[in-house]
Amino acid sequence: SKSRQEARYIWFHAASLGEFEQGRPLIEAIKKYHPQYKILLTFFSPSGYEVRKNYEGADIVCYLPFDLMCNVKRFLDAAHPEMTIFIKYEFWMNYLNECKKRNIPTYIVSAIFRPNQILFKWYAKNYRRVLFDYEWLFVQDQASLNLLYQYGIKNCSVSGDTRFDRVYGIFEQCKPLPLLDKFVGDTVGKYTLVAGSSWPKDEEFLIEYFNQYPELKLIIAPHEISEGHLRSIESKLNRPYIKYSEATEGNIINKDCVVIDSFGLLSSIYRYGNMAYIGGGFGSGIHNVLEAAVYGIPVIFGPNCHKFKEAHDLMDCQGGFLIQDDEEFNVVMKRFLSDKEMLEAAGEKAGSYVKANVGATNQILQKLESHFE
């Protein structure tokens, strides 16, 4: 249609939810400073699309058709974006080649490159050429930049990770939760642990520890909130608890634990903790540690964190604590509970680390400015 032809689109592609959250500060900055553009957002995985198909920041949200030449041409004919932005890891050969052919400037943001990625294998020389199709590659760290340089790719720069901007934005707009204010309100001499996105393996030792230490309060926000999972958490608790959905200002006061049985609150809940435990490290990988660290509290997580640069950075600055098992968890918690100065110093380091890394979105925007005419 004619109006469709006149609309000017910038196309963002995110594999799934995590990448979308990473790209979100950039989408919102473009909407704010360059409202003449509409945003087309595509996902590859249902986990992203299903959760975000009604996201107001985008004008169209859809799945990306698979990277076959006939799909690619049809998709680009229909969408005719003026600019394409891939988030973190997406190297669709045909899409990239065709965008290049059509002179659609294409970028990748918050990218990380490692020598063991398929792109850098000896047999992937032809595939690696897609990296030359990008107008510019914005990478998270110096190691990624060095690797690209080694292969003759010079159209790149280190701009950091836009996820810091995302968690900092959430931190600034953090919703007050009066019930939890009440819950932590009477905690003279007590500490509150927030366990975020916990899995059954995490809960076994978390709750066992909590049951033994009356000076510790617990807010637990499980990754899965099915009836069965909530029941298994409740069966382990030996101290007074309440589910968040059943809490009132009256009945929450004498409880030692709150079980969060709804989604969407976690990033605001971390502010009520003196320390946080981030789940997933005994499963497929830890959840977002930055959401907790931004509040200036130390974060504890399990061993499956090797793919998460920010977890290692937090360990390096002593704001993050890796545990291999329940015994190591107990050691870290006892240190926190017995040494207030150490606890506060660790929290401060975690918060400073996040603040020091804010700003990638602005760097990227400045570089894109020339195209926003």
Image: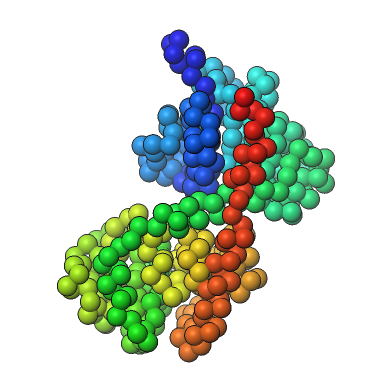
- 224 and 213: which is toward the camera: 213
- 141 and 361: which is toward the camera: 361
Give the quadrant of the C terminus. top right
Give the quadrant of the N terminus. top left
Residue 55: percent from left, percent from top: 39, 38
Residue 92: percent from left, percent from top: 61, 33
- 325 and 112: which is toward the camera: 112
Q: Is residue 114 visible?
A: no
Name above or below for residue 115 compared with residue 67.
below
Q: Is residue 337 visible?
A: yes
Image point (62%, 60%), residue name: 356
- 117 and 196: which is toward the camera: 196
Image point (52%, 22%), residue name: 8
Image point (69%, 53%), residue name: 141
Image point (51%, 88%), residue name: 339
Toward the left, the furthest residue is 250
Toward the front, the furthest residue is 33
Residue 272: percent from left, percent from top: 38, 70
Q: In the drawing, does residue 77 fall left or right of residue 236?
A: right
**Residue 244 position by quadrant:** bottom left
